[in-house]
Image (tube, coloured by chain):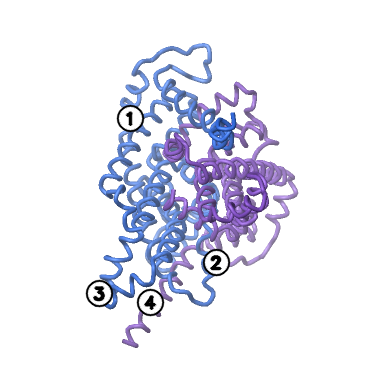
């Protein structure tokens, strides 16, 4: 009995987490897959029937899906590139201590705590076609002659959303990479210095390999988060004009919320997860993630 | 060499100044707009500082009474979420860091996998579960949804904090006659307090900021949270930018202050959780 008690202990501690995960993550996941094969509209609860691949066929017949998928990929790639690069530069600039660094960090890292709603709203306002700050500044600088409707022009609205999301995401990379940089042992860098390595060489051959695990994990997590981002787009453009600034996630939400066609939205979700899984496996492969921890 | 170093220092200063500008401008613009009159806000000649400084937008915001209701709802939801998540993840983090057992790796993998599930996808089935429990359009339903969403990340972070504490300390307490629970409550948790606060704040911000759950699950006006309220401002035909930026600015204050407190510890927990876990 004593032995059983010991064995059960960790599971007793885990029970609340297990229950929450199974009921509110596991079951929804399974249910989504099930619903993807059903005709399921919330507005008609008595009319649920097996749809086979009908929902998937509807997706491929949807005139917007091709464009939105393409835009999603552009959206993720461009956003991630700028978030990562700018975050990395910021972290490097912050590595050496200076007077007031604490306050500086508190301000510059703050957008991490901002909601997508607020960020979407502020940028919607700044990019406003008539009263917006950006238009006014560009006019004052003489760069444009006539005010531009950033959010009302296809293409430009997607760029605007990306700018907002990059702004919101720089702090995450800044914080994480800075923490990683500070964990690189000084001796390692000193040793490389003695061996005659220049600063660029030291950075590429000592620092980067050392912090690689952090880089891999943060990039992966961030990719998923950007892919899944819907609230900022929903607030800022609601996908407009003509669905051109939607990503798959915000499109799925709009579909589920506006048309209440859960079968369709679930099928989209299933494809979405399949795509993410393939991406993750590919990502682990190219970054050789299993060996990434060796240097740490 | 001297010259090169000086140049580097100047370059660094310029870079830091540019970043500060990039981050501050949108926040500044939101704040300045909230201090302008409606006529000035919708004037084609944009002023970078209000000509007639006014707190009218803030007054209007509070006069309606609705905003205070949103604040109250958001406070209830975010605080309850944070408290429940903290308790559940202390237990979970303890189990994951202090026991070796079958299925542990699988559990951690499971937590990581949930991070890959699109949140928008989970909303629909969660709505169905909540409605079968009669919990749609209640704050409790929203809290449950946020707790579930925050557990995976927080439990892994919490595990990282536990791993930072040498087991020796616990063993010493055990020798001194504390049982497992006493050791946890009286020795381990006090040392971990910064980490616990960080997780609490992280979950709080999560609940404070979320929009889509609120839109999906809540229908009554008196239950709206702040992001839902702010978003409704946006969807209106004629947008009251002044009141809206005032609301957005106020909504930022708690999360920014809390974040400034938690920032350092959160990174500690995340990095050690990722490396050692």
Looking at the rendered structure, whether the residues under marks 3 and 1 are on a common chain is answered as yes
Looking at the rendered structure, whether the residues under marks 4 and 1 are on a common chain is answered as no
Looking at the rendered structure, whether the residues under marks 3 and 2 are on a common chain is answered as no
Give the CA distance from mark 4 to mark 1: 49 Å
Residue B249 appears left or right of A187: right
> Residue A224 in the image: x percent, y percent?
40, 43
Residue A238 appears left or right of A57: right
Chain that bears disc 2:
B
Which residue is labeled 3 in the image?
A197
Chain that bears disc 1:
A
Dividing the picture into quadrants, the one containing residue A63 is: top left
> Residue A45 in the image: x percent, y percent?
53, 15
Label disc, if present, on residue B48 of the rendered structure: 2
Chain that bears disc 4:
B
Looking at the rendered structure, whether the residues under marks 4 and 3 are on a common chain is answered as no
- Mark toward the viewer: 1 or 2: 1
Which residue is labeled 1 in the image?
A63
Give the CA distance from mark 3 to mark 2: 49 Å
Chain that bears disc 3:
A
Give the CA distance from mark 4 to mark 2: 28 Å
> Dot 2 surroundings within 10 Å: few (below 14), some, or many (20 or more)?
few
Determine the secondary structure under disc 4. Answer: helix
Colour assigned to chain A in the rendering is blue
Which residue is labeled 4 in the image?
B11
């Amino acid at each position: 009995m004593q032995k059983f008690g010991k064995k059960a202990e960790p599971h007793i501690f885990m029970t609340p987490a297990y229950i929450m995960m199974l009921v509110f993550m596991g079951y929804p996941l399974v249910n989504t897959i099930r619903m993807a094969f059903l005709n399921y509209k919330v507005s008609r609860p008595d009319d649920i029937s097996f749809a086979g691949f009908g929902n998937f066929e509807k997706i491929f017949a949807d005139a917007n899906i091709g464009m939105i998928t393409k835009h999603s990929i552009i959206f993720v790639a461009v956003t991630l590139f700028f978030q990562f690069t700018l975050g990395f530069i910021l972290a490097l600039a912050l590595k050496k201590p200076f007077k007031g660094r604490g306050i500086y960090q508190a301000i510059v890292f703050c957008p991490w705590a901002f909601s997508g709603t607020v960020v979407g709203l502020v940028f919607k306002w700044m990019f406003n076609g008539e009263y917006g700050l950006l238009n006014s500044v560009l006019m004052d600088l003489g760069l444009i002659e006539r005010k531009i409707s950033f959010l009302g022009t296809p293409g430009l609205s997607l760029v605007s959303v990306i700018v907002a999301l990059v702004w919101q995401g720089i702090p995450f990379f800044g914080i994480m990479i800075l923490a990683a940089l500070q964990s690189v042992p000084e001796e390692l860098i000193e040793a490389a210095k003695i061996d005659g390595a220049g600063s660029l060489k030291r950075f590429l051959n000592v620092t980067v390999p050392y912090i690689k695990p952090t880089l891999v994990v943060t990039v992966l997590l961030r990719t998923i988060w950007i892919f899944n981002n819907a609230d900022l787009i929903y607030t800022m453009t609601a996908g407009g004009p003509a669905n051109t600034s939607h990503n798959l996630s915000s499109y799925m939400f709009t579909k589920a919320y506006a048309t209440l066609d859960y079968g369709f939205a679930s099928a989209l979700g299933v494809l979405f997860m399949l795509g993410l899984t393939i991406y993750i496996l590919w990502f682990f492969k190219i970054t050789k993630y299993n060996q990434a921890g060796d240097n740490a | 060499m001297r010259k090169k170093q000086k140049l580097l220092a100047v370059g660094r200063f310029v870079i830091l100044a540019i970043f500060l500008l990039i981050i501050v401008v949108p926040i500044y613009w939101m704040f300045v707009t909230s201090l302008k009159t409606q006529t000035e806000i919708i004037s084609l000649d944009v002023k970078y500082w209000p000509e007639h400084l006014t707190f009218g937008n803030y007054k209007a915001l509070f006069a309606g009474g609705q905003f205070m209701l949103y604040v109250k709802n958001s406070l209830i939801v975010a605080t309850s979420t944070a408290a429940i998540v903290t308790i559940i993840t202390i237990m979970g983090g303890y189990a994951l860091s202090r026991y070796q057992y079958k299925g542990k790796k699988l559990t951690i993998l499971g937590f990581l996998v949930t991070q890959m599930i699109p949140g928008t996808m989970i909303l629909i089935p969660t709505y169905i579960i909540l409605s079968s429990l009669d919990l749609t359009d209640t704050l409790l339903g929203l809290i449950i949804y946020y707790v579930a969403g925050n557990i995976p990340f927080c439990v892994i972070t919490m595990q990282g904090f536990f791993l930072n504490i040498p087991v020796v300390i616990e063993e010493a307490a055990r020798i001194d006659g504390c049982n497992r629970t006493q050791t946890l409550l009286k020795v381990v948790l006090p040392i971990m307090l910064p980490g616990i606060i960080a997780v609490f704040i992280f979950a709080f911000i999560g609940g404070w900021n979320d929009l889509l759950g609120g839109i999906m699950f809540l229908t009554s006006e008196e239950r709206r949270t702040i992001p839902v309220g702010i978003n409704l401002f946006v969807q209106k035909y004629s947008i009251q930018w002044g009141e809206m930026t005032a609301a957005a600015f106020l909504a930022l204050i708690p999360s920014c202050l809390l974040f400034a407190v938690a920032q350092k510890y959160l990174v500690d927990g995340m990095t050690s959780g990722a490396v050692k876990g």
